[in-house]
Amino acid sequence: MKKIFISSDHAGYILKEQIKKKFKRKYRFQDLGTDNSKKSVNYPDYAHKLCRKVSNNSKNMGILVCGSGMGMSMAANRHKKIRAAVCYSVKNTKLSRLHNNANIITLGSRLTKKNTAFKCIEVFMKTKFEGGRHNKRVKKI
């Protein structure tokens, strides 16, 4: 069973919990917080914590959830070896893996419906990096 790191801020907490419930038989999650939706927290703290875990091993993958997906993505992409993609459709999710070798999916709980988020996660986890001409571009990131 593949281990996935997952984290959210207060705005993404409910979707994070729904994701863990939906995929509990398929993936083993290490939840790095937050632990509730009532107390406002700073999303960069949770993005940085997850990125430290994902960057330790090239096979690690992560899921970050905040209100828009943007804040988590901006914080995550400051880390070496991290390629976080804001995903909102199956097509952009697939391309983020095929062409960009994204290792973290970020989702916006206020902008993405639950079932769309689930589909994006399924595509993200099963799609492999295409390599080839994309490899030299990813190395420049």
Image (spheres, grey):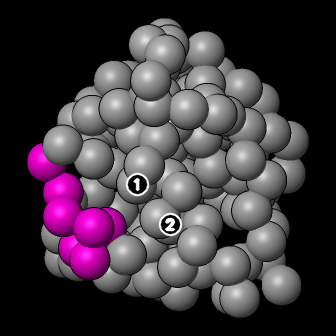
Marks 1 and 2 close (CB-CB < 8 Å):
yes
- Label number found at residue 15: 1
In the image, the segment drawn in magenta is: 111-117
Q: Amino acid at mark 1?
A: Leu
Of 31 and 74, the residue lying toward us: 31
Tell me if 25 is positioned left or right of 100 in this view.
right
Callout 2: helix, strand or loop? helix
Snapshot quadrant of residue 80: top right
Of 32 and 132, the residue lying toward us: 32
Identified at 53% across, 86% down, the residue is 126
Tell me if 54 is positioned left or right of 127 in this view.
right
Task: Name the residue carrying label 2.
Answer: 19
Q: Amino acid at mark 2?
A: Ile
Label 2 crowd bin: few (<14), some (14–19), many (20+), radius 10 Å: some
Whole-percent x and y of residue 51?
67, 33
Tell me if 61 is positioned left or right of 64 in this view.
right
Residue 77 visible to the viewer: no
Picture layout, residue 50 above or below residue 2: above
Picture layout, residue 16 above or below residue 64: below
